[in-house]
Image (tube, rainbow, N blue to C red):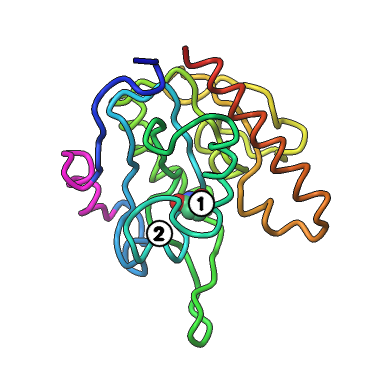
Amino acid sequence: QSAATRGTYWDGPSSGLAAALAGCQRCPLHCQATQVVAGEGPEQAGIMVVGEQPGDREDLEGRPFVGPAGQVLLHAMQQAGLQRDAVYLTNAVKHFKHEVRGKRRIHQTPDRHEVEHCRFWLDTEIRQVKPQIIVALGATAALALTGRKDAIAARRGRTEPGLGGVPALITYHPAHILRLPERADQEAARQALTRDLVAAKALAV
Ligand code: URA
């Protein structure tokens, strides 16, 4: 069994951590979200992937990365030879922050305080899972893991010292890739994300 897949699958809702998370009122975001979205994956995954926060679909389904950005991430993982259930997937912030406009719920980026309040849970996940490498998807995950909010473009593809002493490999957020207007730029960013996941896999042996 490889380091990436050791341990049993942790389906979130039945775990003690997810039960504790369900009652989280550390910041006001729980008021507007449908439910908390806990991380999921093997109990001791070699690789942890951290996104920003649940999106609309994740908020409704209660699982991370099941919406459009999740599809981009999962495709890149597949290209990198990583199965969804071999990796621990979670977010820097566990509730969906949004604004209601008519019938639509528009994503809002969590602020530094919300990230700091929620870092307690990310830290707990890291202590439990003990990954060898953490992939930070985008600026909010990078902030939560490294304390720095600098632009991703200059940091992408590199590892930085991260939360819990685990190196954080910085890469693009899949939602950022989807927002790129030029198809060629999207394709280049998808390939960069895949390369970064391949690098993470090599570091988790
Ligand atoms: N974007 C994220 O950062 N996390 C998810 O779970 C879904 C979309």
Q: Is residue 131 magenta?
A: no
Q: Earlier in the sequence, mark 1 or mark 2?
A: 2
Which residue type carries mark 2? Glu
Residue 35 image point, x, y percent: 29, 62
Which residue type carries mark 1? Gly
Residue 170 image point, x, y percent: 62, 31
Pair 1/2: label in front? 1
What is the span of residues highlighted in magenta in the rendered image? 13-25
Ligand 1 contact, mark 1 (Cβ < 8 Å): yes
Q: Residue at x 39, y 30 (%)?
A: 86
Q: Residue at x 57, y 44 (%)?
A: 75
Q: Are marks 1 and 2 in contact (CB under 8 Å)?
A: yes
The residue indicated by pointer 2 is 58
Q: Which type of secondary structure does the marked residue at label 1 adopt?
A: helix
* Quadrant into which the N terminus falls: top left
For the residues labelled 1 and 2, the Cα–Cα distance comes to: 9 Å
Ligand 1 contact, mark 2 (Cβ < 8 Å): yes
The residue indicated by pointer 1 is 70
Q: Residue at x 43, y 64 (%)?
A: 57
Say above or below: 111 vs 45. below
Q: Residue at x 33, y 36 (%)?
A: 41
